[in-house]
Image: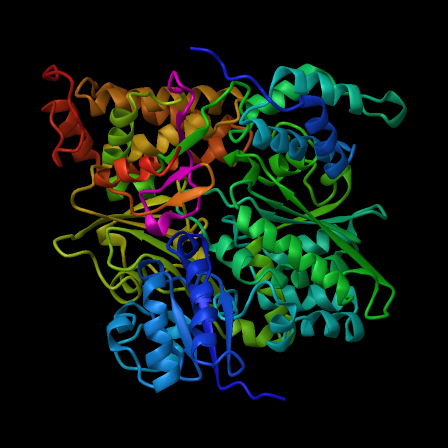
Amino acid sequence: MTVPKIDRDVASVVQAAIEKNGKGPDGLIPILSEINHEFGYIPGEAFREIRKHLHDPSRQMYIAESQLYTLASFYDMLSTKPRGRHVIKFCENAPCHVVGGKAVWDGLREKLGLANGETTPDFKWTLVTTSCLGLCSVGPVVLIDDDMYGNVTPEQISDILERYE
Amino acid sequence: MIKKRAMILVSNDPESIRLGANEIIQHLSEALVTYGLQDEVDVTTVSDTGHSNILPLVVVYPEATVYGPVKPSDVRYLVEEHLYKGRIVEDLLAPPKMLTGQIGWLRGHKGYNPAEQRIVLERAGRIDPDNIEEYIASNGYEALGKVLSELTPENVIDIVEKSGLQGRGGAGFPAGRKWKFVRAAQGRKKYIVCNADESEPGTFKDRIVLEGDPHLIIESMAIAAYAIGADEGYIYIRGEYGLAYRRLEKAILQAREFGFLGENIFGTGFNFNIHVHAGAGAYVCGEETALLESLEGKRGEPRSRPPYPVTKGLWNKPTSVNNVETLANIPAIIRNGAEWYRSIGTPSSPGTKVYTIMGNVNFSGVIEVPMGVTLREVINIYAKGMKPGSSLKLAQTGGSSGSIIPAVLQDTPMDFESFRKAGVSLGSGALLICDQHTCILDLVKVLLQFFRFESCGKCTPCRIGTQRSYEIVERISQGQGKLEELDTLLDLATEMERASNCGLGQTATVPIRDMLKHFRTEVETHIRSGSCPTGVCEMTKEAEKV
């Protein structure tokens, strides 16, 4: 299994994210989110780039790479490992569970041959569970990239997955 | 001027968009041109109307005919029949019984849901959230004008205190008192923070407000800022709510253009600005001090209290953190007065509550009703009863850390006071209704899985307690539990409640306690006979007979 190469310049993505969100401490998480959105995860190089731009004792901004990493590992929407081209998030909370969620989860795992948190060898799919997405009236809910699927049944899984390249 | 004769509303919440709302809008404009009606008929969008089962909705005014679910391919026929020939398309009508709230009320037909009382959701689903003029046309920014021109900050706090408004994030703290504390706190710089990190499982009431009526939150925050003496505000919105984020950003730009935000608002010398800040996925950030940590660019780990945010909050300045629903009540209270607000709901819990209903019931979605309505009323009237073949076994109120209520308690009025007396938590207003096929142990296992995953890990009682509790419940659900482990569960619960740093660890024990209080026999059956009475749990091996 080879990790797909990053074809865009990390430094310029970081710089754009900083310009948009500012150099203050409250910009850190939005900056990381934007980099994550761009690459699907946060490459190690990005931590170095962010520190290069933002660490500035004259502004009382002390930034260490480890501190950025600790943010990336804390928040669920950020990933420090490469993920597939499409990330499937399955809501594992009670409202989806009591209306048939488990059968959908079993169906997803079986169809993709993945366990929670795994990525297919061709880097097409990553399968993860997530906490409530706030779409509980149409559970069970599956989120693929930014597309929401509600009232999902195990029978629909193949059709849904086929829509993605 | 060309006179419009009809207006078409198309729902454009995430579910509707997925089901083709954008194509519907495009087909509508094309069809209107085809029939030469483009100058007579307006097409606009509305947000979630709380009718998840019949989306996308198309509502045609002035008749207020509700069509749904509508497919893009239906549109041309609908325009030809309804707008060109003037005949209602019976086949596409939304089933009357599925309609609730504002639309049900507008139609005024028998067989519709009883009218809700909508204060928080007054406009959501009725106006175009991207158009500030529609907000202004329905009393929008009137309360802010009144506050800035006629009232002192103390007057505002006084009105909110007299109204009896309690925080709707779950704890029920009096909103006016919180503002009073912040106003009285030392320091010139103060903040108002709107907690829109709605991540309690089963709760999506705030999303409906943010997506459907973003200006309401802007107006409320401006009033709050004036009352507490702040000139800057943050909306901390969970990262998953992309649509709500975009609508808020747009609304803030419009409010600036119209002079409701910025410098010298209404020429009164009052300055106020709002930033929208998106989270990145962490349940614990709904806890107010964790939220503030996260806003400051750190891991969302709750602080030790005291000091409380009212004295040392964001960047160590006095801060009022208020939930979306709490804030959404403010303009109506200012416009109509504290007495009016007190006339709704119960004496100890005035006002309305927004509930999200889901589970094994016929209608799932969002309703707003006066405080004090009972669970039985919600299930039988608003949720249209249990699904065919289902009977009520239990309900969980208020999300993961909410109470599990057995069917026998369904006549307790739902307000802060009555629930407190019954030892039940109202929480965020999520109502998860479960039928006889639900295994209590399986449900609690799912809840504990949530807590062990979402525990931030800062304090040991919560980090280890949620993990150990999960392991015990998992063992029992596999037929490998022992009776004495039930005592271990209760011991763990006591320690977690006493020693955890924040509400997450302190309330993660509620499902465990409620399970053993109301459903002990069912749990013991798993242990004694090694079988699951509902057949849900997969037993891995024959249990040792105790």
Residue A28: % across, % down: 69, 30
From the viewer's perspective, is A23 left or right of B112?
Answer: right
Can you tell which quarter of the image residue B467 is in?
top left
Residue B398: % across, % down: 41, 48
- Residue most extreme to the right: A58
Residue A40: % across, % down: 53, 27
Number of numbered discs on residues: 0
Please give the range of residues in magenta.
Answer: A118-144
For the point 56% across and 76% down, the residue is: B340
Residue B376: % across, % down: 27, 61
The residue nearer to you, when weighing A18 against B316, is: A18
Q: Confirm whether the magenta stretch covers residue B151.
A: no
For the point 27% across and 67% down, the residue is: B381
The residue nearer to you, when weighing B93 against A73, is: B93
From the viewer's perspective, is A150 left or right of B184?
Answer: left
Q: Confirm whether the magenta stretch covers residue A139.
A: yes
Q: Is residue B424 visible?
A: no
* Viewport quadrant of the C terminus of chain A: top left
The residue nearer to you, when weighing B286 against A145, is: A145
Is residue B353 positioned above or below B249 on the image?
Answer: below
For the point 62% across and 59% down, the residue is: B217
Is residue B238 positioned above or below B27 on the image?
Answer: above
